[in-house]
Each structure stands twice: as C-alpha cells, then as structure tokens.
Amino acid sequence: MPGLLFAFFLSFSGLTGPLQSYAAPLDNPPGQPVQGIDRNLKVIPGGQTIGVKVKSAGVLVVGHHLVEVSQQSKISPGENSGLVPGDLMISINGVKLDEVSKVAKLVEQAGKADKPLDIVYKRGGKQLTAKLKPAYDRNDKVWRLGLYIRDSAAGVGTLTFYAPEQGVYGALGHVITDMNTGTPIVVGSGHIVQSSVTSISKSQDGDPGEKRAVFLKESQVLGNVQSNTDFGIFGKMSRNPEHSLYQQPIPIAMSSEVKEGPAEILTVVDGQQVERFDVEIIHVAHQQTPATKGLVLRITDPRLINKTGGIVQGMSGSPIVQNGRLIGAVTHVFVNDPKSGYGCFIEWMLKDSGVTKLDEITPYNLKAV
C-alpha cells in the first residue's frame, strides 16, 4: 500500500508455559549494581512512533536467481561462486559498495570484458573473497550476477529514550534484521523521522497484529542511526521530539531493582499521541551481564486490549515505567498469547547507546533468538 511501511517487531515467541531465566552466571552478588552504570542517570522516556531508514555497510545478498543464458541452460553465477543469502558484499574489484546502484555498472564492465569479478564479502564476522563471472541474460539483454541484493531497510518502531545531556537516543529494543535472511543489518548510515499511526491490525492468537503508519516531514530528521545491536538502534539526537509525555528526565532502574507487579508502557495507537497503558510484570530474570528477554509483561489495560488485542508489531521499543523509573522496553510478543511478551532491561540499551560504560564486564557476543 503506497505510503505505508512495515512495522519493526521482528522477534516473536511461541512460549506460553512456565518461564525460566536464562541468565548468565552472576558476576556480582544479587541485588548489587553492575559496575560501570551510574545509578543516578536520568533520561526522558519516549513512546513516540518513529520512521526508521537504514543503509547497510555494503550490499546484502538475500537470494539466488537463475539467469537464462541459452534456450537449454539457466545458471546462477552467484550461487556457483559460493555466495549465500546473508553474505554482505563489501567491495567489487576494489570499489567500495556503499549503494546497490554501483553493482550493475561493475557487472556490465566485467561481462563485456569477459573477466571475473573479485568480490570481498563478510560472513559470520569473517572477511572472505570470491570470484564471480557474470552471465548474459538472453531475454533482458543484460549481464547478471544471479543474485538478489539489497542495501537498505525502512520501517516503523517506537522511541525508547532520549538522554539530553549526552544527546543520544535508543529505540526498538531489538536488532533490525533483513526480512528475507534474518541477518542483522550492519548499519552504514541511517536516520529516524516522525511517524504517524494511521490504523492498527489487531493481534490475535497465532497472528500478531501491527501498527500501520506513514513517515512525516522526511526532510526534518530527528536523529541519525549509528548502530544496530541486539538491544536496538542508537544514534545522536539534538532535542526531545514532539508529543513526549515527559519534558524532564526521570531516573532509571537497574535490573536488580525491577519487581514483579504493576507498571505502564508508553506507546502510540492513533496518530502521534503518546499514551500510558497499564501492564503487569509477571517475571523478572536476574541478569548481571547483557542478555535479551529480561522480563515478561502482560497487557492489563482494557483500552489497549480493545484497540490492539495486545502487543503488536511496531510497539517494539515502547518504554516500560515502574514506580516513576524507566526500567526497560517492550521487545517480543508471544505469538500464541499476544497479550504477553518480553522486554529488555534499560541498562543494556543504555550501555549500547554509549550513555554508560560497562568496562568491568566481560565482553559478550549475543545472538538474537
């Protein structure tokens, strides 16, 4: 539908039974703050719906296709070269790939010269090389790689916080992945803009709904996108965006301070108006090192249930506030029980934003699940 964008909420869970914590071994005694985090830090909770546009740091392979080189033969040079969906092509013949439009010209030059392309790509954090000889498509009369490729993504999510003293923000609460391959997008550049919710497809058992929204004032950028991690997207922002329920920063809570019981989330269900909705925290994982799925929440507000059916796509990043303190963000929905879902702790988002430094914590390597 023209003007509408898919909603970022790319992590789902089918769990509806008893929950258990998958926390790493404790580095600090229970109830003690993680070293490196300022307990007095204050940030402004978000809740605004935002439009997100990112370009990858290279060109992503998202699939193979066959090139008809003769009436009897179809081949995929890309597949034959060993490239697979999820590979990030960094350069071709020494030319840095910062946009997909550069590829066609390089492919045509190599095809006409009857020479293979030297491709540098990344897979699983390792830099590799491949040689690929383009094939001539007899139908379209062009040289092809036999690959489907992409260099950008766009969607709608929710702003989690703005840290005015540092001029940074955090949003989404989970990594942005390519919709075809599930590969986390390595951000080369990007920005966020205002967005307005036009309608909502309600969640129901087995079918998570979504916010439908449009970008507003695309020329008026709210902030840039500098990183895309397991805990969301982060970047610089010069001011608190419009429609905020808070004009002044509020305290944060450490994961050890989060309790089971009542809380509220901030999100938009119509237009640009941020609203408060009641939730219940029903499980808290004891995490002393960064890990996703830190808490489980259940929507209890009848207004939100009536409007959305529970948690919907595009709600990811919605701030969770408990006892006047920001504790985390909504990240996942339970597919078979859309009134329930996971959240991540705010301290891990703050760490990835650069607002806090966890110098004393052992480096980690997380995988989105």
Image (tube, rainbow, N blue to C red):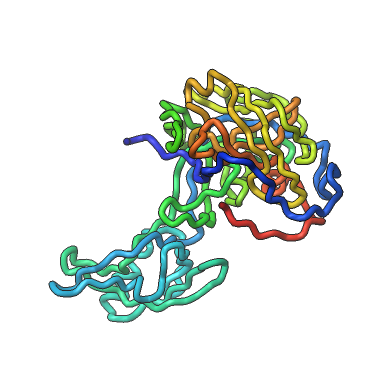
Where residue 4 appears, x then y in whole percent? 38, 35
Q: State the image quarter where residue 132 is shown.
A: bottom left
Residue reaching furthest front? 18
Residue 54 locus on image (x, y percent): 49, 49
Image x and y of residue 237, in percent: 62, 39
Q: Nearer the viewer, residue 22 or 290?
A: 22
Taking the image as drawn, is residue 34 in sight?
yes
Number of marks in the image? 0
Q: Residue at x 48, y 27 (%)?
A: 309
Above or below residue 15? Residue 268 is above
Q: Is residue 258 left or right of residue 312?
A: right
Q: Is residue 193 above or below residue 28?
A: above
Q: Residue furthest left?
A: 71
Residue at the top extreme of this rendering: 303
Please state which of residues 339 and 47 is positioned toward the viewer in this rendering: 339
> Residue 37 appears in which quarter of the rendering?
top right
What residue lies at 23% left-to-right and 67% top-to-bottom? Answer: 142
- Does the image show residue 221? no
Is 66 located above or below residue 223 in the figure?
Answer: below
Task: Give x and y (percent) for residue 199.
Answer: 41, 26
Q: Residue at x 53, y 57 (%)?
A: 186
Image quarter (top left, top right, bottom left or bottom right) of the N terminus: top left
25 to 311, vertically: above or below: below
Quick check: 315 left or right of 109?
Answer: right
**168 to the left or right of 135:** right
